[in-house]
């Protein structure tokens, strides 16, 4: 039988947005469509991996491959719990989800009414950073590869380099929302790929600079293939 590059490996992917409820009819979310993460799931399966796809609410078709298990979640907290269940056996972990950084501190039990008010206050509290948690808990023998994403509107490389280091990623894929052909809902992406500096670069006192590669614009499926 034909051998494939990811045969025998388990790939864990987070995808899509999260929804954080305000009351029974309303929520906070973002423009993520899940295309990048679902692209990863299909490519990883095609390369021979078994895949756990943890997906926020998206309107993409459920992957039909028998080697992809899709877990549907709504909130960041639910995504966090699903990742905690799945991460230990994963060899490659790719976090493309646009996780809501904050949730409403007290979700209203009934629909919030206008009731003649000209403004209302909603208090938000921070959600767990799932990628940072996995970075802090992944195996230390290098047998688990962690890839994070970063979408920025300014200071792309500096912000991405900080995330690569602070979240203990092995790869950080940065895209600028302002680049043509990048970002939410598009079928293409323009990314810069950051990886930690090689060990022999760490002997100076200066902050260690990551390796930075700017990739040309490509389809999200092709990009997932190249990154895997
Ligand atoms: O810090 P920032 O949100 O820009 O980091 C983006 C990366 O972190 C993405 O890989 C995203 O999936 C992940 N993330 C996460 N949990 C959060 C926030 C971001 O896993 N609460």
Image (cartoon, rainbow, N blue to C red):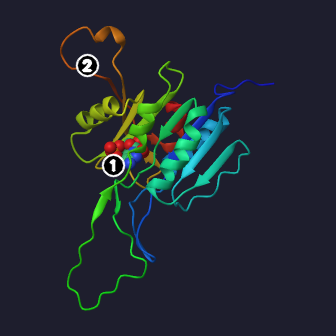
What residue would you read off at disc 2? 208
Which mark is drawn over residue 81?
none
Numbered disc in front, either 2 or 1: 2
Number of labels in the image equals 2
Q: Position of residue 56 (x, y in %)?
A: 51, 56
> From this viewpoint, is residue 82 visible?
yes
Quick check: 123 above or below 97?
below
Q: Are marks 2 and 1 in contact (CB under 8 Å)?
A: no
Quadrant of the image occupied by residue 157: top left
Secondary-structure class at tag 1 = loop
Quick check: 169 above or below 124?
above
Q: In what quadrant does ligand 1 lie?
A: top left
Mark 2 crowd level (few <14, some 14–19, many ≥20, 10 Å Cα): some
Distance between the alpha carbons at the discs numbered 2 and 1: 31 Å
Q: Position of residue 78 (x, y in %)?
A: 50, 55
Asked whether, in this view, residue 72 is left or right of residue 170, the answer is right
Residue at the (65%, 51%) spot, across then down: 63
Quick check: 55 above or below 45?
below
**Depth check: 198 or 130 in front?**
130
Mark 1 crowd level (few <14, some 14–19, many ≥20, 10 Å Cα): few
What residue would you read off at disc 1? 180
Q: Position of residue 67 (x, y in %)?
A: 71, 41
**Depth check: 24 or 228 in front?**
24
């Amino acid at each position: 039988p034909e051998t494939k590059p990811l045969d025998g490996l388990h790939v864990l992917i987070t995808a899509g947005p999260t929804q954080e409820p305000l009351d029974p009819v309303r929520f906070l979310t973002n423009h993520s469509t899940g295309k990048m993460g679902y692209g990863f799931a299909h490519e990883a399966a095609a390369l021979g991996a078994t895949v756990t796809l943890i997906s926020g609410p998206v309107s993409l078709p459920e992957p039909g491959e028998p080697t992809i298990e899709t877990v549907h979640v709504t909130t960041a907290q639910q995504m966090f719990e699903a990742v905690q269940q799945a991460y230990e056996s994963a060899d490659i972990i790719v976090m493309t989800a646009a996780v809501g950084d904050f949730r409403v501190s007290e979700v209203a039990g009934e629909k919030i009414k206008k009731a003649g008010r000209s403004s209302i206050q909603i208090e938000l509290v921070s959600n767990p950073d799932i990628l940072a948690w996995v970075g802090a808990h992944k195996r230390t023998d290098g047998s688990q590869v962690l890839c994070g994403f970063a979408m920025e509107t300014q200071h792309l490389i500096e912000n991405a380099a900080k995330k690569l280091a602070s979240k203990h990623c092995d790869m950080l894929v940065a895209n600028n929302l302002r680049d043509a052909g990048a970002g939410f809902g598009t079928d293409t992406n323009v990314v810069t790929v950051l990886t930690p500096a090689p060990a022999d670069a760490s002997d100076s006192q200066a902050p260690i600079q990551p390796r930075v590669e700017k990739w040309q614009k490509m389809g999200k499926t092709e990009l997932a293939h190249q990154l895997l």
